[in-house]
Image (cartoon, helix red, strand yellow):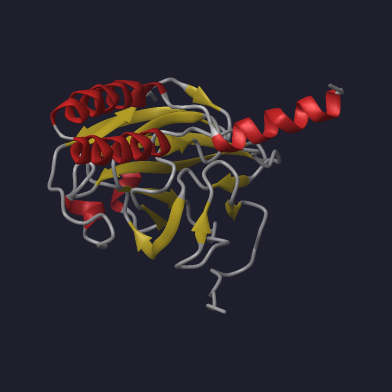
């Protein structure tokens, strides 16, 4: 076999069988074991369990992404669709910095359904200066009030642009199905744009807080790809975009 054919097979394999996030293996193995047991008890139950196992495998996929590499670009931290864009908001109350009292931020909310990739990636190169976990409710993450009421993990970080430091935040929010947030980022950790920092199980929302003067380059309803879709740009001066369904 020539090298071109081998490379084509590798691409097909990567498409059909993507890498799995480590947090998913206990669930996949558990459902697979349940499939075997239920098949012995009653075959239809085994079929249902098999379908759930396949879905679980699909849910925890962690495909490679190509992150645009240019100073000032902010990429989407999550896969899903933009559910809300809210201007002039404060940071979450648990991020107790002084500027938390200022309505200087624009919040872009990305809703993840159970078929989206749930791995979260850092939106721009930066250093974590605060991390907080807040217990809360589990209302539908598609609702705007989920940003204030739901259980969440909030990260405040600093990024440099043209030798000036800017503070931003990214928040992982649990939904009525998702009951577990895994956040690997700790205070003092440094990340490059597009690097993985956590995962949410099983249907959730991720909010990005853009600093004053940085407008979203996406529209409500637009589909996002984590680590790839450009969400905003420090160098851009255009106003918040309005999208049309066609």
Picture residue at 34% right of the left edge, 24% below the top: 23
Residue 84 sits above or below residue 67 on the image: below
Residue 204 lies left or right of residue 219; in this view the side is: left
Tally of marks: 0
Residue 148 lies left or right of residue 29; in this view the side is: left
Picture residue at 60% right of the left edge, 45% below the top: 228
Q: Quadrant of the C terminus?
A: bottom right
Res 238 seen here? yes
Q: Quadrant of the N terminus?
A: top right
Q: Quadrant of residue 88?
A: bottom left
Q: Nearer the viewer, residue 186 or 167?
A: 186
Residue 20 lies left or right of residue 102; in this view the side is: right
Residue 206 sits above or below residue 236 on the image: above
Q: Quadrant of residue 63?
A: top right
Residue reaching furthest right?
Answer: 2
Residue 31 image point, x, y percent:
26, 28
Residue 139 image point, x, y percent:
16, 54
Picture residue at 18% right of the left edge, 29% below the top: 38
Residue 70 lies left or right of residue 77; in this view the side is: right
Residue 143 image point, x, y percent:
25, 62
Residue 82 image point, x, y percent:
43, 60
Res 96 seen here? no
Q: Quadrant of residue 128?
A: top left
Residue 174 sits above or below residue 221 on the image: above
Q: Nearer the viewer, residue 7 or 19?
A: 7
């Amino acid at each position: 076999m020539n090298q071109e054919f081998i490379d084509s097979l590798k691409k097909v394999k990567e498409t059909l069988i993507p890498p799995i996030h480590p947090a998913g293996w206990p669930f996949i193995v558990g459902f697979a074991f349940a499939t075997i047991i239920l098949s012995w008890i009653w075959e239809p139950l085994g079929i249902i369990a098999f379908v759930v196992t396949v879905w679980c495998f699909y849910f925890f996929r962690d495909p490679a992404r190509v992150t645009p590499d240019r100073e000032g670009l902010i990429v989407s931290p999550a896969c899903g669709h933009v559910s809300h864009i809210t201007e002039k908001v404060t940071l979450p109350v648990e991020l107790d910095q002084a500027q938390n009292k200022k309505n200087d931020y624009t919040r872009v909310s990305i809703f993840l359904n159970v078929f989206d990739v749930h791995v979260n990636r850092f939106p721009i190169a930066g250093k974590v200066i605060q991390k907080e976990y807040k217990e809360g409710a589990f209302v539908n993450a598609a609702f705007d009030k989920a940003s204030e009421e739901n259980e969440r993990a909030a990260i405040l970080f600093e990024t440099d642009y043209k030798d000036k430091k800017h503070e931003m935040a990214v928040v992982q929010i649990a939904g009525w199905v998702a009951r577990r947030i895994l956040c690997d980022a700790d205070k003092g950790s440094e990340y490059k744009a597009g690097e993985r920092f956590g995962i949410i199980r099983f249907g959730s929302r991720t909010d990005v807080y853009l600093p004053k003067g940085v407008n979203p380059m996406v529209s409500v309803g637009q589909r996002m790809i984590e680590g790839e879709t450009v969400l905003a740009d420090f160098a851009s001066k255009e106003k918040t975009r309005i999208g049309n369904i066609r």
